[in-house]
Image: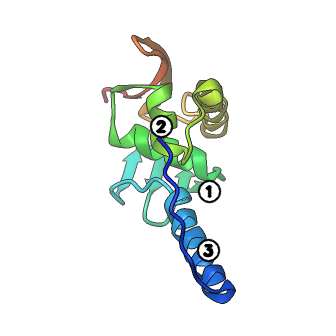
């Protein structure tokens, strides 16, 4: 249910109030997902969350903000299948359920293409799996 508040004030005060509200909303909307701030290593794959850097064999891998956030969720939930709707709800500030699953699939496929985990000799991989809630992905850590 929507609510409406009417405030009487001068134009100057209303402009200042409108700016403060916009700043608060913008701050809330665009806060990125922040993982625990750890450094993960899976063979040649190194994920440095505090620095927001990913390297394979010491070579920097350029990821988008969303790809990095998805990877952060994967590594903080190893060997656990995460449904696409869960990933979308956690990472996108305003989840769009109509297009959400497609957005996640596009981002994860791009992430997989950039990382090329199977070809790089890492001890992990990203696997597509079905869940009761629809498609999902699992960040599998391989036994050494």
Query: Height in image: 105 above or below 27?
Result: above
Along the line of sight, the residue nearer the viewer: 123 or 88:
88
The disc label shown at residue 18, or none? 3
For marks 2 and 1 on the same chain, the one whose residue lies earlier in the sequence: 1
Q: Residue at x 63, y 25 (%)?
A: 98
The disc label shown at residue 60, or none? 1
Along the line of sight, the residue nearer the viewer: 8 or 37:
8
Q: Residue at x 33, y 26 (%)?
A: 80
Residue 13 falls in which quadrant of the image? Answer: bottom right
Please give left or right for residue 103 compared with residue 35 in the image: right
Q: Residue at x 44, y 58 (%)?
A: 49
Along the line of sight, the residue nearer the viewer: 24 or 88:
24
Please give left or right for residue 141 compared with residue 54 in the image: left
State the CA–CA distance, disc 2 to disc 1.
Answer: 28 Å
Residue 102: x %, y % from top left: 65, 25
Query: Height in image: 45 above or below 12?
Result: above
User: Is residue 57 visible in the rendered structure shown here?
Assistant: no
Residue 81: x %, y % from top left: 38, 23
Residue 110: x %, y % from top left: 67, 35
């Amino acid at each position: 249910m929507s609510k409406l508040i009417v405030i009487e004030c001068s134009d100057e005060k209303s402009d200042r109030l409108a700016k403060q509200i916009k700043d608060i909303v913008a701050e809330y909307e665009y806060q990125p997902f922040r993982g625990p701030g750890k450094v993960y290593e899976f063979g040649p794959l190194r994920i440095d969350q505090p620095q927001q850097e990913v390297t394979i064999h010491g070579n920097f891998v350029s990821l988008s903000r969303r790809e990095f956030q998805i990877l952060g969720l994967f590594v903080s939930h190893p060997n656990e299948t995460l449904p696409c709707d869960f990933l979308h709800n956690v990472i996108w500030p305003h989840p769009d359920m109509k297009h959400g699953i497609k957005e996640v699939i596009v981002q994860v496929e791009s992430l997989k293409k950039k990382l090329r985990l199977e070809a790089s000799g890492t001890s992990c991989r990203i696997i597509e799996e079905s869940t009761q809630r629809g498609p999902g992905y699992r960040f599998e850590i391989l036994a050494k």
